[in-house]
Amino acid sequence: MSRVVKVWVATTLMASGGLVHAASWQRWAGACPWRGNQETRSCETRMDHLYDFLPPQEPWLPAGAAAQLAGASLLVLAIALLPLPWALTGRRPGLPSVAALLATVLSVTDVGLAALRSGLEGTVVSPVGSNVTIWCWLLLPPLLFAGVAVFARGWASGAAAVLLILASPLVAFFSYAIGPWDAQPWWEAISGLLTGAAGAFVLAEAIRRPARRRDAQVEPTVVSGPRTLP
């Protein structure tokens, strides 16, 4: 059962990473190269926070289907989060951990639905909880992943939790999402790659065969009796 849960978590994490990578492609492809000269007029235009879609906020301009893909990515991530602590730590969380987990899942789901609806309607749709939800979405996931990293069972699970921390928007907004103008080109794709890599680590651990233990062979002890002299 544990292996099935790990495969489920791994698959959903990789799907979530792939979707946000596709969303990043919608924003930057054709305007900013992944590598090379990014000091062009079209690239500088796309760096503007007007095109941010995680989450869309006024003022906002849609960039293709980026918001829809990003919203779908967050919804898939929310599905992965439910069994994630159990899958990576091997033990069921207590009541406080369950409450924190549910709050994290709800905030991710709310922001994901808001981004998806914004993309479909072409205008900003705020989360149900407004700014409170956005702050929860920023703060709760990295805290959850940090707790999982501390209690992770196995190096692969620990590595996956660390990668998820690095992929979180809170870390990105203070590091690789900062660009020369507003946003760093392709930062969402980097977050998606980190999320997908976390899923790959979980999958590797799920399909790995446990090492066989060799039974210790106890050699019989020969007890020699006293010799009788003739």
Image (spheres, grey):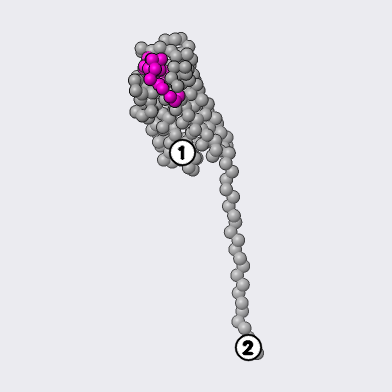
Residue situated furthest bottom in the rendering? 230
Q: Quadrant of the N terminus?
A: top right
Residue 205 x/y as whole percent: 54, 39
Inspect the image, locate mark 1, and give the three-letter code of the amino acid beneath it. Answer: Ala
Going 50% across and 21% down the picture, which residue do you hit? 22
In the rendered image, the quadrant that contains the C terminus is bottom right
Query: Which numbered disc, 1 or 2, marks the residue that appears first in the sequence?
Result: 1
Q: Are marks 1 and 2 in contact (CB under 8 Å)?
A: no
Residue 126 is at least partly visible in this image: no
> How would you rate the neighbour count of disc 2 (Cα within 10 Å): few for under 14, some for 14-19, many for 20 or more?
few
The residue closer to the viewer here, 221 or 61, is 61
Q: Which residue is mark 1?
A: 159
Q: Please report the bounds of the magenta region as a residue range.
A: 34-54
Looking at the rendered structure, the kind of residue marked 2 is Leu
Residue extending furthest toward the front: 37
Q: Is residue 154 above or below residue 47?
A: below
Does residue 190 appear in this view?
Answer: yes
Q: Is residue 38 above or below residue 143?
A: above
At a point 47% along the width and 17% down the height, the residue shown is 30
Residue 194 numbered tag: none
Please provide percent x and percent y for residue 70.
46, 20
Instruction: Using the image as rendered, state which of residue 102 and residue 17 is in the foreground.
Output: 17
Residue 130 horizontal/vertical position (percent): 36, 17
Q: Is residue 195 magenta?
A: no
**What residue would you read off at disc 2?**
229
